Amino acid sequence: MNISQCKALVTGAGGGIGQALVEALCREGARLLVAGRHLAPLQDLARRFPGQIEIVGADITTAAGRDAVLEATTRFDGFNCLINAAGINRFGLLEQHDEEAIAAIIGLNVTSTLQLTRRLLPQLARQERALIVNLGSTFGSIGYAGFTAYCASKFALRGFSEALRRELADTPVKVLYIAPRAARTAMNDSQVVAMNKELKVTMDDPPIVAAAIVSAVRRERSESFLGWPEKFFVRLNSLLPAIVDGALRKQLPIIKRFARS
């Protein structure tokens, strides 16, 4: 898709990657409807890119929030791209998670994303050309200790993207799945940053991730995995998971030490 012709709804626009993505899209001439629970970062973006951004304050984990987004898109002329970037994470062993934490991760990362997409699909299908862009994760292809619930949510999002892509194959709507690796955002707290440093895991800054997402949207690649060697391990895990099991087993004592601290 030509970014200057992109008229997109971006959920999670107040987050680290979300804000960087909005900036990158606006610099290339896109018009955006940005959605989020916290208005301050959205208003700041609107001030920086006058005439290109409209705001809807909404919590998409609620039916009322999804209703508000749906109503806003009906007034957003030419709406042709949905970017599902809203998501949350929590580092810790599964035994350390309570039921509310697990429900919150699955609720936003999976259930709300599917529900919102379902509501907006008829509008997108009326366009000559439209995109649904689901922001996943390397952990949607590689199960990783300390992130069990998050992995479950991103595996589900990847499966949803694949199934919906096939379901819409005879329509003008294309479905993209874009999977960044670890990023330096508030989603990864100081414990995760310290652990990744010890494990020598590369963390990307949000503008780097945003630029890669924009590139994937421009090329309309069905699936994009960001970062090396992460994209290699995604492929290896699909073919020879026992090899990845062995490599990650060596990291387990470090992961458990940080999780229990």
Image (spheres, grey):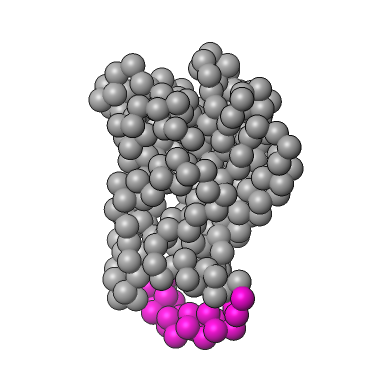
State the residue in front, 111 or 125. 125
Q: Residue at x 41, y 71 (%)?
A: 229
Q: Residue at x 44, y 85 (%)?
A: 250
Q: Position of residue 9 (x, y in %)?
A: 49, 29
Let me know if residue 206 appears in the view.
no
Furthest residue in direction left, as rendered: 48
Say above or below: 125 vs 108: above
The image quadrant where one finds the C terminus is: bottom left
Answer with the quarter of the image where residue 30 lies. top left
Q: Position of residue 174 (x, y in %)?
A: 61, 39
Q: Is residue 221 magenta?
A: no
Span shown in magenta: 239-259
Q: Position of residue 123 (x, y in %)?
A: 64, 23
176 on left or right of 164: left
Q: Is residue 258 magenta?
A: yes
Q: Main secondary structure of the magenta part?
A: helix
Q: Residue at x 54, y 33 (%)?
A: 82
169 on left or right of 194: right
Say above or below: 5 vs 248: above
Q: Position of residue 189 (x, y in %)?
A: 34, 57
Q: Residue at x 42, y 32 (%)?
A: 3
18 on left or right of 118: left
206 on left or right of 90: left
Answer with the quarter of the image where residue 119 lies. top right
Say above or below: 209 vs 248: above
State the residue in front, 27 or 85. 27
Let me know if residue 126 appears in the view.
yes
State the residue in front, 61 or 200. 200
